[in-house]
Image: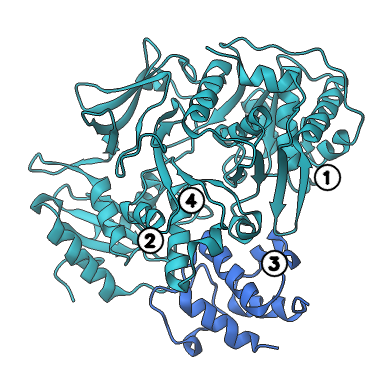
Chain colours: A cyan, B blue
Amino acid sequence: MTESVLNRIVARRPEHAGTLTVAGLGGTRTMPLAEFHDRARAVAGALRREGFGAGDRVGVLAPNGLEWALLDLACLMIGAQTAGFEPGKFGAPGELVGRYDLAVVFCGGPLDGDTPPGVRPIAEISGYAAETPAALDPVGYGPQECTTVKFTSGSTGVPKGLAATVGSIDSSLHAVQALFEHRPGDNLLVFLPLSLLQQRYWLYSALRWGHDLTLTTYQSVFAVMPAVRPTVVMGVPGFFNAAKQHLESTGQAATALFGDRIRYLWTGSAPADPAVLRFFTDAGLPIFEGYGLNETCIATKNHPGAHRPGSAGKALPGKEVFLDADGVVCVRSDHPVNTAYTYAAPGESERIFKPGGVVRTGDLGRIDDDGFLYVLGRADDVIVLDNGKKIIVRPIEARFRATGAVAECVLFCPQQTELVAVVDPAPGRADARAIAAALGAVNAAGEPDERIARVIVADEPFSVGNGLITAQFKPIRKNIRARYAHRLDDVKEGIHAGSR
Amino acid sequence: MPDLDDLTRRQLAKVLRNAPEPAQIDPDLDLVEAYGLTSLNKVLFLTSVCQAAEVGLDTFTEDDLARMRTLGDVVAALEVHPKKG
């Protein structure tokens, strides 16, 4: 492989004019990335002074902010491994220390008087950053070394922990740069949690290639985006869905929300609705969908040089995508993220990590003659009816969302004989007539075996707070099934197909 | 000074799928639980309200936003902040 991006950004102070902006409802702060590098070195010196270094794992349980970014680079500088925890999805900080072998965990928010050992406020990082930058011996990583532990989103069960190799991080950074050519003058906007390693990629990219980076939170992103005027927005389908709904309901131009400098929009982590992709494309904002798992990093990606709407793009340089005998998407990487989980139940690693750097994703797909991947749905989300017919639920759910009557739709088959949908009708009160009409339209467009017999309207919107969607706004099927089990199992419940 | 109650009702009515009459909106109901706004929808709604009321967005913090659970909360928050000069 070519140069290691991580090794370079650790050792070399940026010589370009790129900036880091931390923007939020409470204010905005911009600093040159060269200064950010200095501040990170100061933090690194303080951490080393306190005895942290190579072999230590530093936990971070905090919302996006300057301290998180500083701590991440500082740990890279001293050879300490990070472990990012998404706020609200893990237990008490004190429990994390023992469970994940942490030397310390830095937490956002106030800590009470009974703070357990090893738990410290992330606000301390600001104090360290104000110190004189330390002179540090350069840390050099080999491609097999791991700089961080990342956790799965939890949409399919208890989060699993996976240590990410330097080789895989460098490979992804180089591949994305080859496809998108981020350059000085670009401003990448990041709002998803920094506990997701891929969101920290854009900081590494900015340090290496000299573009700007704006860091905010999902609570603030829509408020700050018009003023920030990013050229790239790193989003997920739920974010773009909300933006589309807002723009359609208000009649505003997309530039009123996204600013007037968008070069492209990035979407991933879940399939995007074709209607959403069309909306932004028609608005003059190119949007590129991709595919990957925690276990593969970015595997395929549409980009300006190779784009086929409806697909998830072609394999990135350094990756190969193919289907196994069951039609399940498999990804082989020159530089795998890893070959096993660090934290997972017995058997989990063997189920997904195969020899030769291959990950068996569990997603069904097809690959066209030009190498574009189309993801059809989870193999687990195939419903087998009592007549033996296999139903892939995702396209049907997308069809229901496309009617506009619901914000989210998840299909189940509680009695093995008929499909039942649980829908989130947000925003606004549920319009039963509109949902019934949409149900009729969805059934008319599908195969007879794909007929949805009835629709359960959720009591409240699916949210991260009620545990029904992930932080990347993906529905958690298991939790939705459990929450609405009684109504799913009662054949009288819901809006029935054919009702008015 | 715009009538904040009327302004916020009209803005909320715009983003609700069933497009109710603004006068029908109950200012004491929870925006998320009763009116089904997702977290992202709520931020968008508040952004629009602040623009319409000519109140600077930087007036509020993320904690302020989290505390605005009803339309009444939104009106009360706007009333204590001056229009942008």
Amino acid under disc 4: Gly
**Distance between the Cα atoms at labels 4 and 1?**
29 Å
Is the Cβ of the residue at disc 4 closer than 8 Å to that at disc 1?
A: no
- Whether residue A213 is visible to the viewer of this picture, yes or no, is yes
Task: Check the picture and name the quadrant holding the C terminus of chain A.
Answer: bottom left
Amino acid under disc 1: Gly
Residue for badge 2: A407
Chain label for disc 1: A
Q: Is residue A482 left or right of residue A251?
A: left
Q: Residue at x 68, y 19 (%)?
A: A8
Q: Position of residue A31 (x, y in %)?
A: 78, 42
- Provide the secondary structure element on which disc 4 rests: loop
**Distance between the Cα atoms at labels 1 and 3?**
34 Å
How packed mark 3 is, by other alpha carbons closer than 10 Å (few <14, some 14-19, many 20 or more), is many
- Sequence-earlier tag: 2 or 1: 1
Q: Residue at x 45, y 25 (%)?
A: A295
- Whether residue B27 is visible to the viewer of this picture, yes or no, is no
Residue for badge 3: B57
Q: Residue A467, which numbered label?
A: 4
